[in-house]
Image (cartoon, helix red, strand yellow):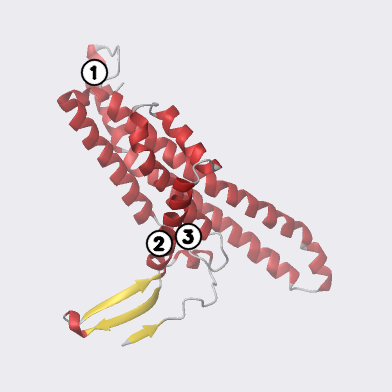
């Protein structure tokens, strides 16, 4: 039996836009009575991955496009021209995936998947874990010299090693937190400004013209949100490249 939920119900609270809702529920008796559920975040992630896959194919065939060249420049500059080439497909796919999901969240009644910390933390934890495994595979126990600052006095060595270790571990949180927090803050502010402008415009004929100023702020902030979607995607891959470089070259 298939059941659909009313996922486009009126959003009364700014936080409602981040709520995970069930779009489709399917009972499957042939699978030991398992219930297959499709949520809004799952649906939009599938859409985002599909669009990212298409864009990756177009960029591979027409490599002169701006995004391809920009990400290639980031990889080359952040890692290096020889070692960075092998990681470029991963970095480019990561950028497109985050960018597409950021832009999908800008669509009215859409869903911002990258606003959920469980998703961004999963990505950041996987990246840091992969960089750590890469460093251990390449350098062995010498990898732990990454936590020892150059020219460190012997008396301060235990304290500075602890600080460096905590800084390294915090990458798991900071990388994903930066992305999700910016998306959440932007969407909340845009929702509040839009609701305020709508209430002013529907209060009366005179108030309609008074709402032109806040309406201009909403339009301007929408453009800023669009820019943030690109900037946060770029910041995410730049930091990813720096973590890979630390694993490859240590200090």
Q: Which of labels 3 and 1 is toward the front?
A: 3
Q: CA distance from mark 2 to mark 1?
A: 45 Å
**Farthest-out residue, bottom:** 1
- Reading the image, the residue beneath label 3 is 112
Report the quarter where the C terminus lies.
Answer: top left
Disc 2, disc 3: CB below 8 Å?
Answer: no
Using the rendered image of the protein, determine whether residue 114 is visible from the camera's viewpoint.
Answer: no
- Going 15% across and 26% down the picture, which residue do you hit? 141
Hey, which quadrant is residue 239 in on the image?
top left
Task: Give the answer, above or below, for where 52 lies relative to 150.
Answer: below
- Reading the image, the residue beneath label 2 is 45
Which mark, by number, is residue 157?
1
Q: Residues within 10 Å of mark 2 (few under 14, many from 20)?
A: many
Which badge, 2 or 3, is on the more N-terminal residue?
2
Q: Nearer the viewer, residue 45 or 19?
A: 45
Q: Residues within 10 Å of mark 1 (few under 14, many from 20)?
A: some
Task: Give the answer, above or below, for where 209 lies relative to 115.
Answer: below
Residue 206 coordinates in the image, percent (x, y)? 84, 69
Q: Dot 1 lies on which element?
A: helix
- Going 44% across and 52% down the picture, which residue do you hit? 57
Q: CA distance from mark 3 to mark 1?
A: 44 Å
Disc 2, disc 1: CB below 8 Å?
Answer: no
Which badge, 2 or 1, is on the more N-terminal residue?
2
Residue 84 coordinates in the image, percent (x, y)? 36, 31
| Number of marks in picture | 3
Q: Which of labels 2 and 3 is toward the front?
A: 2
Q: Which of labels 2 and 1 is toward the front?
A: 2
Q: CA distance from mark 2 to mark 3?
A: 9 Å
Residue 210 coordinates in the image, percent (x, y)? 80, 63
Which badge, 3 or 1, is on the more N-terminal residue?
3
Report the quarter where the N terminus lies.
Answer: bottom left
**Farthest-out residue, right:** 206
């Amino acid at each position: 039996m298939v059941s659909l939920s009313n996922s486009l119900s009126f959003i009364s609270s700014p936080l409602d836009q981040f709520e995970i809702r069930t779009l489709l529920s399917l009972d499957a008796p042939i699978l030991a009575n398992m219930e297959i559920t499709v949520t809004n975040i799952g649906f939009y992630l599938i859409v985002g991955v599909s669009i990212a896959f298409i864009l990756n194919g177009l960029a591979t065939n027409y490599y002169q496009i701006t995004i391809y060249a920009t990400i290639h420049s980031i990889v080359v500059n952040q890692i290096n021209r020889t070692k960075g080439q092998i990681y470029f497909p991963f970095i480019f796919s990561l950028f497109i995936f985050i960018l597409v999901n950021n832009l999908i969240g800008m669509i009215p009644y859409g869903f911002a998947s990258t606003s959920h910390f469980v998703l961004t933390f999963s990505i950041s934890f996987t990246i840091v874990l992969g960089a750590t495994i890469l460093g251990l595979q390449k350098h062995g126990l010498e990898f732990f010299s990454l936590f020892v600052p150059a020219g460190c006095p012997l008396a301060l060595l235990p304290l500075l090693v602890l600080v460096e270790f905590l800084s390294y571990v915090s990458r798991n949180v900071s990388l994903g937190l930066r992305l999700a927090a910016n998306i959440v803050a932007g969407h909340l502010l845009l929702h509040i400004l839009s609701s305020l402008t709508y209430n002013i415009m529907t209060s009366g004929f005179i108030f309609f013209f008074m709402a032109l100023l806040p309406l201009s702020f909403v339009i301007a902030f929408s453009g800023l949100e669009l820019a943030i979607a690109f900037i946060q995607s770029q910041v995410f891959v730049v930091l990813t490249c720096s973590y890979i470089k630390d694993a490859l070259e240590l200090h």
